[in-house]
Amino acid sequence: MRTVLISGGRGLVGRSLSKLLKQKGYIVYKLTRRPKKSSHIYWNPEKQTIESKHLSEVDVIINLAGSGIADKKWSSDRKTDLINSRINSIQFLKSVSEKMPKLKYFISASGINCYGYNGPHEKTENDPYGDDFLSVLVKDWELASSSFEDVCPVAKLRIAMVIDHKGGALKKLLRPVKLGVGSPLASGKQYVPWIHIDDLCRMFLYCIENDISGTYNAANGYITNRELMKTITKKMRKPFFFPAVPKSILNLLLGEMATMLTESLKVSNEKIRKIGFQFKYANFDSAITEIVKK
Ligand SMILES: NC(=O)c1ccc[n+]([C@@H]2O[C@H](COP(=O)([O-])OP(=O)(O)OC[C@H]3O[C@@H](n4cnc5c(N)ncnc54)[C@H](OP(=O)(O)O)[C@@H]3O)[C@@H](O)[C@H]2O)c1
């Protein structure tokens, strides 16, 4: 039986992932700044503190910690928080890894928004990083993860927009749809990479069980924003005739963060499929049907 430590494990991905890992027989502990259960281990990377209980049992670290990219407008203070909550927490984890003599594997969340936008072709893991804020953040985040390579193998999953009924970006997109005012954003022609929560959790498990190292795009596929909104409204039996929300309004409301909604990104998932991972959901329609059912 293997013991897994998930930093940021109380968040959206961590909750589903720990459920899957426990079903598969893993022992799961979560690092959190707000411990509520005996399986929670207190840490605070900012204050450089961590409870030492269970650390000596850890075989695998799954790093999910980081403040929400789309939670608030990107002021310069917010940008600092987005960077520090990811990079400093990995650096802190690395500094306490000597308390984990059994550690054999480190796998970290990373972001699909690392290639820049609007390129003509599907981005593969061999494509260079972009030079916008998110691309640079992901580059530094991945570099921090790589620091574990002198301890154990390291994998990084470049996660697309996670489709889950419990929260995240989809929940925000569903709000206007539920009110009957769902519409495309900006031109609606921009592509959005997405991944179903079950496939993302299965991918983490697949990497752990097959000792996979390296960097992988974690996306079932990509879909235009218009098609995404249209599919959601159809599944929820809501109207879809409102005019698109203009890009200028999104820029005004969200500032630089609007790029995540208005700019286009196509990514390839061939690399992970080539090493044997099989996605459960072949297209957005089947993924969203399952979510809406819940
Ligand atoms: N969900 C998506 O669509 C998506 C897409 C691409 C990448 N990702 C990445 O995947 C990871 C997990 O995503 P998620 O959706 O599960 O995120 P989430 O629900 O926001 O959870 C992230 C967790 O990180 C911890 N955290 C936040 N700020 C922190 C700080 N300053 N120091 C230490 N821990 C901090 C929090 O744990 P405590 O409050 O319990 O300490 C929180 O529960 C994140 O790094 C995210 O950027 C997610």
Image (cartoon, rainbow, N blue to C red):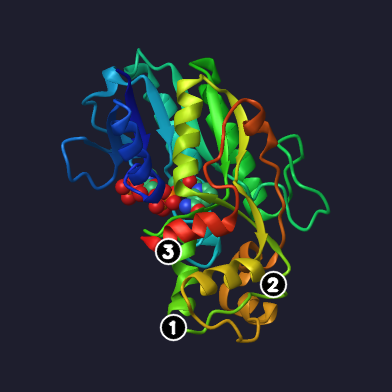
Amino acid beneath label 3: Val
Residue 200 spot, x, y in % from top left: 49, 42
Helix, strand, or loop for circle 3?
Answer: helix
Q: CB atoms at circles 3 and 2 under 8 Å apart? A: no
Type of the residue with mark 2: Gly
User: Does residue 15 appear left or right of residue 142 in this picture?
Assistant: left
Say which residue label 1 marks.
179
Q: Residues within 10 Å of mark 1 (few under 14, many from 20)?
A: few
Residue sticking out furthest to the bottom: 242
Q: Is residue 41 visible?
A: yes
Chain-order first, disc 3 or disc 2: 2
Q: Which residue is mark 2?
A: 188
Residue 292 image label: 3
- Quadrant where the N terminus lies? top left
Q: Nearer the viewer, mark 1 or mark 3?
A: 3
Q: Residue furthest top?
A: 101
Q: Please name which of the two marks, 3 or 2, marks the residue nearer to the observer.
A: 3
Residue 212, x across and y down, in percent: 55, 22
Which residue is at 55% across, 41% downward? 110
Question: To which quarter of the image does residue 75 belong?
Answer: bottom right
* Label 1 or label 2, whichever comes before in sequence order: 1
